[in-house]
Image (tube, rainbow, N blue to C red):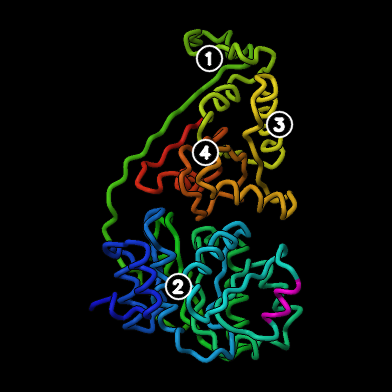
Amino acid sequence: MDVFSHYAPFIQDYIYEHGWKSLRPIQVAAAEEIFNTDHNVLLSASTASGKTEAAFFPILSEIYNEPEDSVKVLYIAPLKALINDQYDRLIDLCTDVDIPVWRWHGDVAQTQKRKLLKHPSGILQITPESLESFMINKHMDIPHLFGGLKYIVVDELHSFLRSDRGGQTFCLIERLSKLANVNPRRIGLSATIGNLEDASKFLGAGSNRKTVTPRVQNEPQIWHLSMEHFYKTNPQASSRDFDPSQIEPKTDKAPELADPGIGYIFEHTRGKKCLVFTNSREECEAVCQELRAYCAYNHEPDRFIIHHGNLSPALRETAEAAMKDDDVYMTTCATATLELGIDIGKLESAFQIDAPFTVSGFLQRMGRTGRRGNPPEMHFV
């Protein structure tokens, strides 16, 4: 099958304009399944392998000439930041055609939401919690809004597996399908699924469709990993196995600041675009404040920004915009809000303070780096 010839003209133009010489294996495999079957499709491939385009190139080609009488594609993602990132990518993809892209979560203005309710069409991006609120508050509008729904795309599917949130999300999908009297195909995306068979069953549960997982050979990756261990307490220093050579001396630039691990991060993020991951909002605030204190002590401009779920939308969106700006070399202290799927471009390194809670969390956090042809790089501190 010649996949490229099956794409809509505006998709073909997009590929030419961006200088793509060929499609990636996952994009070819996804197009063959979406164009030639009515199956649900689980797309599992490494980070930055082009899964978003693999799903949306054929989906947009399929709905290209559909009448604008309903939302055609429902995109469900676990994080607002991921929706905002994908919104920009889809807007860029649909610039030259009349396929609207809508967002619906707590940070979206009511004026935009009213426009969708008045003219349902195109692609709707939503979080599970906003979908539940939507189902409760707009119950009577479901048949009108989703009567022509063709596809449901579930991004970062692994984050929904084995969790109450995931079970609730798929219950909402079932309720929506019954209320709107539709049977949309489900497309799942993830880079960190261990058991593809179980994930396929989860994605297709209750849909009365077969679920397939195209198998593709990913290119081998080179990872750069560093483990930095700093001793800060006397019991460790007094143990018989203690090796004084392992102690990282305090930086002479900020001798009064106590944490040598933070000093290490400060020095190794200078002049770079980096992410510093912590495991809680409180720790994120503390780390960012201490890094800024190093800047003040050294009379350097502040080069640290912060991103977590308790911040206002304006602060989060400012941080997201700064990270995507190739000319801004700042480091962002973040929690899991920046863990999933976001393309930050020229991000050089990720730093993880202590261990992340899950293996998939580690892989996702490291996967924020290693794009644009560079190897993924993570420092554990």
Residue at 53% x, 28% y is 270
In magenta stretch: residue 64: no
Q: Earlier in the sequence, mark 1 or mark 3?
A: 1
Marks 1 and 2, how far apart in space? Answer: 48 Å
User: Mark 3 — residue?
Assistant: 289
Marks 4 and 3, how far apart in space? Answer: 18 Å
Which residue is farthest left? 1
Marks 2 and 4, how far apart in space? Answer: 33 Å
Marks 2 and 3, how far apart in space? Answer: 41 Å
Marks 1 and 3, how far apart in space? Answer: 21 Å
Residue at 34% x, 81% y is 35
Does dot 4 land on a helix, a strand or a loop?
A: loop
Residue interval drawn in magenta: 110-116
Left of 341 or right of it: where is 137? Answer: right
Q: Are marks 1 and 3 in contact (CB under 8 Å)?
A: no
- Could you say which quadrant of the image residue 303 lies in? top right
Q: Earlier in the sequence, mark 2 or mark 4?
A: 2
Residue at 40% x, 77% y is 10
User: Mark 4 — residue?
Assistant: 273
Q: Earlier in the sequence, mark 4 or mark 3?
A: 4
Left of 297 or right of it: where is 329? Answer: left
Name the residue type under label 4.
Answer: Lys
Name the residue type under label 3.
Answer: Gln
- Secondary structure that dominates the magenta span: helix
User: Mark 2 — residue?
Assistant: 187
Q: Are marks 1 and 2 in contact (CB under 8 Å)?
A: no
Q: Earlier in the sequence, mark 4 or mark 1?
A: 1
Marks 4 and 1, how far apart in space? Answer: 24 Å
